[in-house]
């Protein structure tokens, strides 16, 4: 259940961040979970290799350079980048660490299907409830704003292909 909650927070915060910051900032921050894991290992006094430390240091330098980049290509201040959007993307990285750690503990004794199905179900239910609460989503509709909009003739072939 906690793993599903962490996965819902990951996807919810990351997708929301895409509306509030640039794609570059969002992707860089949401994929920074290896940096968080290395910092967590260091805090817990676990063994971390030199390569992991060097890679993390390089990642933090890159994140610092990115945070300073609030200008468009023509030199004007970017209105697309916001601290809130960047923070939501970072929350997505932090929450995926919780998802990974829970999965690491549970997958030792649990088959993949028995782990993945309830985790994905909990995440989907929570995200569906959030969409109903904060967006104009509807439950029983095949329209694009419906929770089952992916079942429409437009999207079903792509979903079936996946």
Image (cartoon, helix red, strand yellow):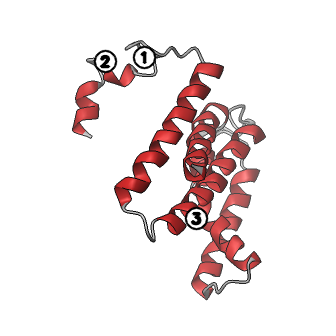
Which residue is tagged 2? 152
Which residue is tagged 1? 144
SS at mark 3 in the image: helix
Q: Which residue is at 52% across, 41% downward? A: 122
Tell me the quarter of the image containing the C terminus.
Answer: top left
Q: Residues within 10 Å of mark 1 (few under 14, many from 20)?
A: some
Front one among 150 and 108: 108
Whole-Å distance between the Cαs marked 2 and 1?
Answer: 8 Å
Q: Position of residue 109 (x, y in %)?
A: 44, 69
Residue 101: which disc?
Answer: 3
Answer with the quarter of the image where residue 8 lies: top right
Q: Position of residue 98 (x, y in %)?
A: 62, 58
Left/right placement of residue 162 relative to residue 114 reads left
SS at mark 1 in the image: loop
Q: Can the viewer see residue 161?
A: yes
Answer with the quarter of the image where residue 35 lies: bottom right
Q: Residues within 10 Å of mark 3 (few under 14, many from 20)?
A: some
Circle nearer the viewer, 3 or 1: 3
Whole-Å distance between the Cαs marked 3 and 1?
Answer: 34 Å
Residue 111: which disc?
Answer: none
Q: Which residue is at 75% across, 38% downward? A: 84
Q: Which residue is at 70% across, 71% downward? A: 40
Front one among 2 and 68: 2
SS at mark 2 in the image: loop
Answer with the quarter of the image where residue 101 lies: bottom right
150 to 33, vertically: above or below: above
46 to 108, vertically: above or below: below
Mark 2 touching mark 1, by CB under 8 A? yes
Whole-Å distance between the Cαs marked 3 and 2?
Answer: 36 Å
Left/right placement of residue 105 relative to residue 154 reads right
Front one among 131 and 16: 131
């Amino acid at each position: 259940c906690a793993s599903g909650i962490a996965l819902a927070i990951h996807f919810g915060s990351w997708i929301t961040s895409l509306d509030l910051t640039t794609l570059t900032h969002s992707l860089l921050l949401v994929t920074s979970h290896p940096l968080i894991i290395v910092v967590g290992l260091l805090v817990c006094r676990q063994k971390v290799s030199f390569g992991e430390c060097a890679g993390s240091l390089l990642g933090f330098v890159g994140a610092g350079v990115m945070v300073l980049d609030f200008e468009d290509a023509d030199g004007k201040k970017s209105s697309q980048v916001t601290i809130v959007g960047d923070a939501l993307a970072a929350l997505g990285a932090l929450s995926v660490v919780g998802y990974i750690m829970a999965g690491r503990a549970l997958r030792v004794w649990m088959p993949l299907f028995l782990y993945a199905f309830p985790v994905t179900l909990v995440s989907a239910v929570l995200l569906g409830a959030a969409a109903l609460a904060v967006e104009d989503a509807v439950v029983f509709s095949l329209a694009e704003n419906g929770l089952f909009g992916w079942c429409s003739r437009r999207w079903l072939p792509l979903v079936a292909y996946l």
